[in-house]
Image (tube, helix red, strand yellow):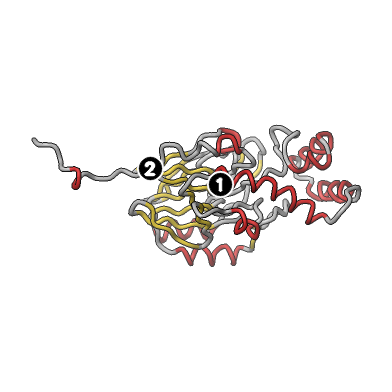
Amino acid sequence: MPPTPAAHRRTRHRVHVVSDVHGNVRDLTRAGDGADALICLGDLVLFLDYADHSRGIFPDLFGVENADRMVALRTARRFTEARELGVRLWAGIEGDRAKVIEGAVRRQYDELFRAFPTPTYATYGNVDMPPLWREYAGPGTTVLDGQRAEIGGLVFGFVGGGLRTPMRTPYEISDEEYAAKIEAVGEVDVLCTHIPPEVPELVYDTVARRFERGSRALLDAIRRTRPRYSLFGHVHQPLVRRMRIGATECVNVGHFAGTGTPWALEW
């Protein structure tokens, strides 16, 4: 049989997907190698590394000992005490709290956005600061939230942010606002979000030993619109990384800050 003419050969596509980058600039610079595009599902900022308490904005401001105390309180779900500790620590910092944090986040964003390859499609995580992204996203980076993009013949939908929790991270929104963004995306081939659908096995973190917040609206949309894939992050050490919901393959793409390895999708 003669070889298939080049014009009729099926073009293969490959995208790499990362989430929960949390300051991992070194590996982000290589995350798009060998792929047609990179998709980032948010959480670029590193406030406090729960594995290494010396890393992040918090220990830079308040020291490792206080970072140890904060992690211990949050892990024990003693959120009121954690907030009280934060108030005491901030009382000793000169300058406006919001401006101090913004300055630290800007320094991280400057490095992280320069590390993105072209093209990159990105949405926000719950610890990100969306108003700043417009300043740092270059022409090769497309930021989407409640929007769609076509990549290699497939339609990808993007919904960023997280739902409200006692942690009070920067980009937490109401269930109603999140559901509206899911509705705006509509039917897609690949549904890309920062948080997972509300399924116990997907939202339980085995190291933190707690259930993170997943989205019921996302779960309903998966059952209703039946995308090929639902891709997400947020839960760093999930009980289950991959499962099917009806026709949809649901995948936690991994804690990129810890693994340094993107998840690959080929078609």
List x then y, in percent, for residue 220.
48, 59
59 relative to 188 in the view: left or right? right
The one nearer the camera, 42 or 206, is 42
Q: In which quarter of the image is the N terminus?
A: top left
Q: Quadrant of the C terminus?
A: top left
Amino acid type assigned to the residue bearing label 1 in the image: Pro
The one nearer the camera, 176 or 99, is 99
Q: How crowded is mark 1: few (under 14 residues within 10 Å), some or many (20 or more)?
A: some
Q: Mark 1 points at which residue?
A: 200
Q: Nearer the viewer, mark 2 or mark 1?
A: 2
The one nearer the camera, 222 or 108, is 108
List x then y, in percent, for residue 113.
58, 47
Q: Residue at x 66, y 39 (%)?
A: 209
2 relative to 191 in the view: left or right? left
Q: How far apart are marks 2 and 1 (CA)?
A: 30 Å
Q: Mark 2 points at which residue?
A: 14
Q: Quadrant of residue 179?
A: bottom right
List x then y, in percent, for residue 225.
40, 60
Task: Identify the residue at the far left of this view.
Answer: 1
The one nearer the camera, 33 or 219, is 33
Q: Residue at x 83, y 37 (%)?
A: 63
Q: Which residue is drawn at 53% across and 57% down?
A: 143
Picture layout, residue 204 above or below residue 171: above
